[in-house]
């Protein structure tokens, strides 16, 4: 990210820069930390898997317990595990901490029963936190699942989570606050989903393709949540776009930084008893091994195509980077994809200058910028 910051310092608009990695899973947190260190605002182009987030699990579990005629104790308490709280709750009492929820579950009988019977059990059981009685009363007061009622109930659930559940995520998060950002995004997405749900649910009821039930609401919520959203979920023109190679296709960005060109990472290593060096020799057709037939999996075609897309996306300049060893000191070999590029290696002393407080651009990168200015004139 020092290169990005230096490009910015030399007048390149951040909207003209994109950082590309093969897979964001291992890079999101370090790139976020590095961005913050250099005063940059990162925007990660990732598909937020809404169905795997706590806010979605919360509304889904509420639908599940309301849909069940005789919920088990696990189904009954699942919304509490996802930080359910009543709309009138205060932060001093809610949400119920996980340990208390688990102790309450263990204190309940194994047999499934109706919500009314659970309410009576919770009131009579001395081993149960009294807040569970409040929760059971809320379940008992929940209306029939008309489109308007569904919207009102789930909106209250999500808004209360935003008020009381999100602070718990932030309190338990790392300094980079990545989980907090993801939880916040998920909350916004689920709020939008609830609004979409009202109209889609009403339409399906009118068409007769769904019955009026909380289980239908849960089913439709799952369907809406798994639709692919737009790629970039933030709108900050001054931010740095950080995206996976899968998402660079057909984009045109003046300056692209491809990160993590490591053998076994980009391209990813396939399972084979044949050593990677021999695989590459067979693929290149070197010597006598050139007569051997390569396995299709060795060609890592998807990774190579995505790398080609990354090259094509760079309108004015491309910078490729890699690390030479892991955090544990293990050597990391360069990606074989680099064999096909005519690159200018940045000397060690220029890399050190780039990482210094002055953040001086390497000569090769400076020449790339100067060439662009000359061409534009």
Image (spheres, rainbow, N blue to C red):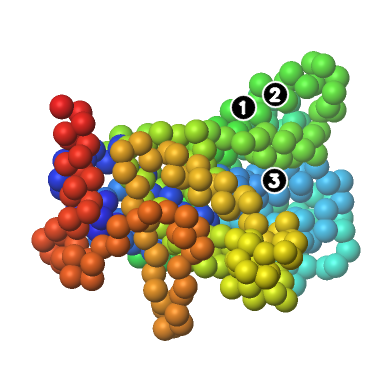
Q: Distance of mark 3 from mark 2, alpha carbons?
A: 16 Å
Circle 2 sits on which residue? 200
| Residue 199 position (above or below residue 135) | above
Q: Residue furthest left?
A: 358
At horizontal 76% and vertical 46% (from top left) the residue drawn is 64
Q: Position of residue 342 (x, y in %)?
A: 38, 54
Q: Considering depth in this image, is 82 or 286 the residue closer to the camera?
A: 286
- Taking the spot 63% from the left edge, 56% from the top edge, the residue there is 300
Quadrant where the C terminus is found in the figure: top left
Work out how far the residue at label 1 is from the one at label 2, CA to CA, in angstroms.
6 Å
Q: Where is residue 293 shown, x and y percent of the image?
A: 75, 62
| Residue corresponding to mark 3 | 60
* Left or right placement of residue 28 versus residue 303 in this view: left
Q: Residues within 10 Å of mark 2 (few under 14, many from 20)?
A: some
Q: Mark 2 and mark 1 in contact (Cβ < 8 Å)?
A: yes
User: x, y (%) of residue 128?
Assistant: 68, 67
| Quadrant in the picture for residue 205 | top right
Tag 1 residue:
196
Q: What distance separates the C-alpha of mark 1 from that of mark 3? A: 15 Å
Q: Secondary structure at mark 2?
A: helix
Instruction: Label 1, secondary structure: give it.
Output: helix
- Specify whether residue 303 is in view: yes
Horizontal side of 163 relative to 62 (left or right) equals left
Element assignment for label 3? helix
Label number found at residue 28: none
Mark closer to the chain start, 1 or 3: 3
């Amino acid at each position: 990210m020092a290169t990005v910051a230096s490009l910015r310092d030399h007048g390149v608009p951040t909207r003209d820069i994109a950082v590309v990695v093969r897979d964001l899973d291992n890079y999101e947190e370090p790139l976020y930390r590095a961005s913050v260190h250099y005063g940059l605002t990162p925007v990660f182009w990732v598909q937020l898997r809404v169905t795997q987030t706590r806010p979605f699990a919360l509304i889904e579990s509420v639908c599940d317990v309301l849909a069940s005629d005789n919920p088990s104790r696990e189904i009954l308490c699942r919304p509490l595990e996802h930080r359910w709280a009543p709309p009138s709750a205060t932060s001093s009492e809610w949400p119920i901490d996980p340990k208390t929820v688990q102790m309450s579950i263990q204190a309940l009988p194994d047999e499934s029963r109706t919500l009314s019977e659970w309410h009576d059990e919770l009131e009579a059981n001395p081993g149960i936190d009294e807040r569970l009685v409040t929760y059971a009363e809320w379940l008992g007061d929940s209306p029939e699942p008309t489109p308007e009622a569904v919207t009102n109930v789930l909106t209250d659930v999500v808004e209360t989570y935003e008020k009381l559940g999100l602070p718990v995520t932030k309190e338990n998060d790392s300094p980079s606050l990545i989980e907090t950002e993801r939880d916040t995004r998920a909350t916004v997405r689920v709020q939008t989903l609830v609004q979409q749900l009202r109209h889609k649910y009403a339409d399906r009821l009118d068409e007769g393709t769904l019955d009026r039930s909380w289980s239908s609401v849960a089913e439709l919520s799952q369907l809406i949540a798994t639709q692919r959203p737009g790629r970039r979920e933030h709108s900050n023109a001054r931010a740095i776009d950080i995206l996976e190679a899968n998402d660079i296709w057909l984009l045109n960005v003046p300056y692209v930084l491809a990160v993590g060109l490591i053998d076994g990472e980009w391209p990813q290593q396939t399972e084979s008893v044949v050593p990677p060096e021999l695989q590459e020799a067979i693929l290149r057709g070197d010597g006598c091994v050139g007569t051997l037939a390569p396995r299709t999996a060795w060609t890592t075609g998807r990774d190579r195509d995505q790398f080609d897309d990354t090259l094509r996306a760079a309108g004015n300049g491309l910078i490729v980077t890699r690390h030479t060893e892991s955090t544990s000191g293990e050597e990391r070999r360069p990606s074989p994809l680099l064999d096909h590029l005519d690159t200018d290696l940045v000397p060690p002393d220029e890399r050190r200058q780039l990482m210094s407080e002055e953040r001086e651009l390497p000569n090769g990168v400076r020449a790339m910028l100067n060439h662009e200015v000359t061409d534009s004139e």
